[in-house]
Amino acid sequence: MSMVTFYPKSDRFCAGNPEALQITHGCNRHQHWQKQIGFGLVGNEDGIPFYGDVHDGNRSDKAWNPEVLSRIHEQFKQAKIDDEWIDAADSAAMTKDALAQTKAANAFLVTRGPSSLRIVKRAWAEADSPHIPWSEPFALAERNGATHRVWETASTYEGHPVRLIVVESSALDQRKRKTLEKERVKEAELLREEQIRWERHLFSCREDAEQALTSLKASLRSRFHRVEAAVEEIVRPKKRRGRPKKGAEPEMETLHLLRLDIEFDHEA
């Protein structure tokens, strides 16, 4: 076994130097307990890499994207390339700094809008309108026969104009319908169990039943069904131990239960 020791000429790579590469814990999907470093790679439309770097293990994509845009811009300037270009990145590139650097680099950014953004939620809500002028359906591949249609709108984000394109897929719609049907059946089963449980639970005091009704209404989160719940009063002979006396009038008692009426909501 041999060992090679590297002696740097400067303290740039020493652990105490703040500019040194930080091998530390980061956003690792598989092994959160291990330290890491990050590798960044940018390729062109043919899959040929033309930029790469190594960065700290806890460097986030939101901080890395603007830096990469700036460095690629410098490379293009050195190569005397003044043409506009397109940066295709994931949703982490949708930040104020990345958009500003995209504009400075004479580039266009194509990314997926994060679902947490208000402009994305607004576009989704508008896309559900029956008056939206969707494009004609088109297919990108014949493998699964899926078709797509798109609708475009415009907005601003962090002071920058953006184009938002909503894409609807027939294959995704089919999967969603199957998923929604499974969720509807599961919800119906759970509501039926609740219905049986509360109709078997008898209250001697109406106030206790009303309190249970209030808690039940607050806890119900029905998505596919309409649920009406109310306190129902029942009067029945009071149960006694032993055999009742001949000719004795049965003693009656008043009890209360929660009655649930469940109906499928066709508009949900």
Image: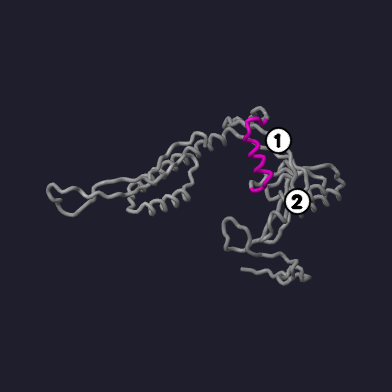
Magenta segment: does it hold 118? yes
Q: Quarter of the image holding residue 15?
A: bottom right
Q: Which amino acid does label 2 sit on?
A: Ala
Q: Spot the residue most to the left.
A: 246
Q: How far apart are marks 1 and 2 (CA)?
A: 22 Å
Q: Which of 247 and 111 is in front in this view?
A: 247
Q: Nearer the viewer, residue 217 or 235?
A: 235
Q: Nearer the viewer, residue 240 or 126?
A: 240
Q: Nearer the viewer, residue 34 or 63?
A: 63
Residue stretch in magenta: 116-132
Q: Quarter of the image holding residue 154?
A: top right
> Which structural element holds mark 1?
strand
Give residue 157's position: percent from left, percent from top.
74, 47
Q: Would you say residue 193 is visible in this rendering?
A: no
- Residue to which mark 2 is pinned: 98
Between tags 1 and 2, which lies in front?
A: 1
Q: Would you say residue 236 is visible in this rendering?
A: yes
Q: Which amino acid does label 1 sit on?
A: Glu
Q: Is residue 191 left or right of residue 58?
A: left
Q: Spot the residue most to the right.
A: 80
Q: Earlier in the sequence, mark 1 or mark 2?
A: 2
Count of marks overlaid on the render: 2
Residue contact between numbered discs 1 and 2, judged by CB atoms under 8 Å: no
- Residue to which mark 1 is pinned: 152
Please report the residue visible at 80 percent of the width from the left and 45 percent of the height from the top. 107
Question: Height in image: 141 above or below 18?
Answer: above
Q: Residues within 10 Å of mark 2 (few under 14, many from 20)?
A: many
Position of the N terminus by quadrant: bottom right
Please report the residue visible at 72 percent of the width from the left and 41 percent of the height from the top. 46
